[in-house]
Amino acid sequence: MCGIVAYIGQEQAFPIVLKGLKRLEYRGYDSAGIALLENGEIKNYKRQGKVAELESFTDNQDTEGTVGIGHTRWATHGLPNDINAHPHTSGNGDIALIHNGIIENYDILKEGLLSRGHKFESETDTEVLVHLIQDIKDHEKVSTAEAVRLALNNVIGAYAIVVLSKDNPDQLIAARKSSPLVVGIGKKGDYYLASDATPIVEYTNEVVYLEDEEIAIVERNKGLRLYNIQNQEKTPYIQELELQLEALEKGGYEHFMLKEIHEQPHSIQDCFRGRLNVDTGWVGLGGIKDYEKQLASANRIIMVACGTSWHAALVGEYLFEDLARVPVEVEYASEFRYRNPIIDEGDIVIAISQSGETADTLAALELAKSKGATILGICNVVGSSISRITHAGSYTHAGPEIGVASTKAFTAQVTVLTLMALAIARNKGSLNEAKFRRIITELELIPEKVSKILESSDYIEELSKEYKDASNALYLGRGNSFPVALEGALKLKEISYIHAEGYPAAEMKHGPIALIDEEMPVFVIATKGTSYEKVVSNIQEVKARKGKVVAIVTEGDTQVKGMADHVIEIPNTDEHLSPLLTTIPFQLISYYIAVMRGCNVDQPRNLAKSVTVE
Ligand code: G6P
């Protein structure tokens, strides 16, 4: 949710910041802007729309300068136009600021500033903050860095900011609370600041992740200094990045989403690498090893997440309950945090989050921690906020996911949840040896079965043509296929803007059946398993109302073939693992339909990948 990037050093800042913004564009693409400081003047270029608009706008402009800050916006306060675009400057133009987050008390602060003669151009909360900094600087006669610190002490809300000030062209001031910020330490005394490490990795692998309420001051020739908001100096903890640059490129695919769908055989394998040994019959997750016993004897596990990660949690609920016999509740993080939940010290709260930065998930965890619960995380982004505040956790190792619609992160989350459920089951003795062995043997085969499904991409593309003009779609599944139906519907609506709903197949009779006619595609998961016959009946109910049925079936199925308009055959697997396979055709269908409808697959309208505001 908004990407920020900044550079100070010996090189020209503009191309570095611009490239960084392109890498961060998945965080928001309502507008983009860059401010540069050169010869005592701040040049501020901003444009509504994507970074490419800003690039053409600045084509023939003076973009000289060795210090610069840039921003790509996902609008919260104010329309996505040129004026509301960041960077924002103080009234006299001496200070420029970029911001990711929300200043919740901006209206009260603005009133005070208005009464002291400040005039505002934009409708943003960010402009209020930069004016506040200038106001404090002028009235208290302090340095910009001190004014930033004092201003932040008056702010309620979330922020990651970088400040550029005319009076100190050799300095950038950065701070964070709840929104992420990373400092990259360059090799030639130069510094990079960004919302995540993706704009930094091609220059350095030495980074410092700022903690909440920390202020970083980076100065040419003087280095990095770190303070808390009370002004006590801290020692920066320098970490080494493991991110590879190639992982951030499209690698020959037309879209990141398609690349990420096709990466799944590898990402699933990377996820269980070193965590599974079929020969010796062993499963283990190093990160939560010390918590296995506690998980096995937990009275209750609560999983909190948002979006696609919430669907992974629902799959996790089936796995944990069925295999490990531990009661699980799955909660939307945004609901959980505001409804005074009952949390005991014996509860374990597991957050699932691709980015590890989702504001609601983070807040839900903090709440659970404050009530004494053990908090664990399942995150993809290494070093993310959730991974740092949890007692322990497991990374999904899916590699960077750039497409806004989540694909490989989902299957990696489900893989980690499967491993966790199996490890707990083993610890608890809730699963007999034969069943345990069967599941892990099947789990190891999942990557090649995913590859096999991906080989049917052309067929799936072909059948998708028939449904590209639909206005509505229904996704049905039972048991652990129900969350996959929800995820299928979410994918379709996210990127193709077709209204779609996921339902437990049996619930169709209680409402959605009223919508079915010959225009309505119904995507059904009808693989072999406990509810197969029941789902077959549900397909018949749809056909009786002339609905179009696309069914995902197990290889060799003949029964559904005779009824459905299209079937997509997938390899057989253990029922517990079927979400790892059934979700793949749905990802492909949404992808192809979105492409055929001319939608921007990687950057769907109004969405952002990392939602760092509530
Ligand atoms: C946004 C993204 C989704 C994602 C959700 C949760 O809505 O567009 O793809 O599932 O946030 O994000 P997280 O990083 O916590 O998994």
Image (cartoon, helix red, strand yellow):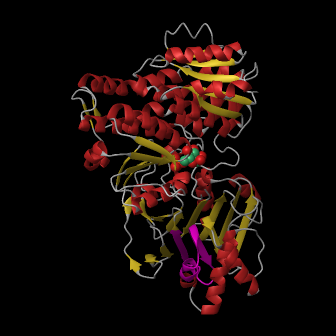
In the picture provided, is 228 more to the left or to the right than 135? Answer: left
In the picture provided, is 359 more to the left or to the right than 449? Answer: right
Q: What is the span of residues highlighted in magenta in the rendered image?
A: 148-176
- Is residue 181 covered in magenta? no
Could you say which quadrant of the image residue 446 lies in?
top left
- Report if residue 384 is visible in the image: no
Q: Residue 473 at x, y = what percent? A: 69, 28
Q: Residue 107 at x, y = what percent? A: 70, 74
Q: Residue 43 at x, y = what percent? A: 71, 72
Residue at (34% x, 37% y) in the render: 421
Q: Relative to the observer, which residue lies in front, 524 or 232?
A: 524
Above or below for 181 versus 349? below
Residue at (67% x, 56% y) in the render: 74
Q: Quadrant of the N terminus?
A: bottom right
Above or below for 599 versus 433? below
Q: Residue 600 at x, y = what percent? A: 69, 40
